Image (spheres, rainbow, N blue to C red):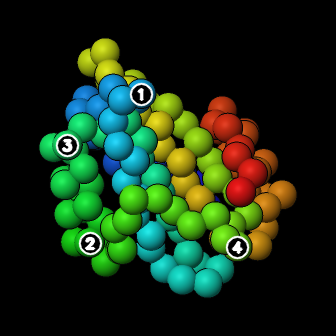
Amino acid sequence: MKAVYALGVFVGSIIAACGDGGSGTTVACTMGSGTSKTCIEYSGLSGEAIQGQNDACTNAGGVASSACSHAGADGGCRVKSTAAGSSQIVTTWLYAGNADTEKMACTSNGQTWIAP
């Protein structure tokens, strides 16, 4: 579970310099299915970063889209990353059926839990 959060933060940090956190576009990457499904949304991306994120998603075997589905989601774990004066918001949506455990892991890492 923590690896999923770390992945979102890591990838988000890499491309944070390309977004401003407020005026960009949201893109998403869904990996897995059923209770193994995870979807990561990146908000505040510039045009350049959108294509790069979509390419990284599909190259890793994911499905790129404009937003994560909240249907069947336990909730989302949100973090804002900032680098070089720009920022973006990364929300990892989880579907494993363990909302209480996922919420605890999210908030214990200083991130914000979002209900679906």
Indicate which disc, 1 or 3, sits on the residue closer to the N terminus.
1
Vertical position of residue 12 compared to residue 1: above or below: above
The residue nearer to you, when weighing 8 against 66, is 66
Residue 111's spot in the image, x, y percent?
Answer: 64, 37
Local packing at callout 3 (Cα closer than 10 Å; few below 14, some 14-19, many 20+) is: few
Residue found at x 26% / y 72%: 58
Residue in view at x 63 percent, y 48 percent: 77
Which amino acid type is shown beneath numbered disc 4?
Gly
Secondary element at image label 3: helix
SS of the residue under disc 2: helix
Residue 62, placed above or below residue 51: below
Residue under label 3, please give it. Answer: 47
One can see residue 16 in this view: no
> Which of the 4 image quarters holds residue 66?
bottom left
Q: Amino acid at mark 3?
A: Gly
Q: Earlier in the sequence, mark 1 or mark 4?
A: 1
Mark 2 Cα shell of 10 Å, populated few (<14), some (14-19), many (≥20): some
The residue furthest left is 48
Tag of residue 84: none
For image coordinates 47% across by 37% down, the residue present is 89
From mark 1 to mark 3, how far is it between C-alphas? 13 Å
Dot 3 or dot 2, earlier in sequence = 3
